[in-house]
Amino acid sequence: MLGESIVPSAVLLSGAMDAAPDQDRPCCDNGAEESGLSDLRACGLSARETQILDCLREGSPNKVIARKLDITEATIKVHVKAILRKIGASNRTQAAMWASQRLPRRGGASANV
């Protein structure tokens, strides 16, 4: 199994892995001049991918995200790869930084120092 990719059959059947040739390059730059939900729509992120991106921003590992969203860890990995490709990030840390600049903050939580 070294070097092989495993994709859940539900993802393949939904067509989520089908990418048009122009979708291989990121549609979003990593600058912060535009922010908000319009960036998410422009990048083609689904509602589920946005939820996962929010969890990445919080620093949650795949196992915790999977439990929170009641889906498998393998599905989370597929979504994370899709998110990284869509926003042009190399890793989940870059994705979290991108999300922290663009996703709306959830209210109420203030930092206690």
Image (spheres, grey):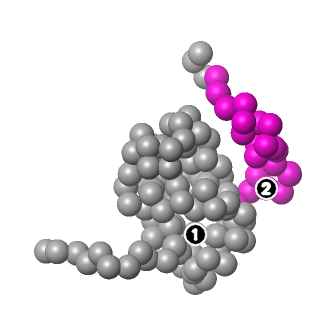
Residue 77 percent coordinates (x, y)? 55, 40
Q: Earlier in the sequence, mark 2 or mark 1?
A: 2
- Residue receiving disc 2: 23
Indicate the quadrant containing the N terminus: top left, top right, bottom left or bottom right: top right
Question: Closer to the camera, 35 or 63?
Answer: 63
x and y percent of residue 28 in the render? 67, 68
**Identity of the amino acid at label 1?**
Asn
Q: Which residues are magenta?
A: 4-26
Read off the residue under disc 1: 30
Please tell me which residue is depicted at 54% across the width and 41% down the height of the picture: 71
- Observer-nearest residue: 11 or 30? 11
Q: Quadrant of residue 14?
A: top right
Q: What SS does tag 1 mark?
A: loop
Residue lying at the far left of the rendered structure: 113
Identity of the residue drawn at 67% across and 60% down? 46
Residue at point 51%, 73% (across, down)? 103
Q: Residue furthest top?
A: 1
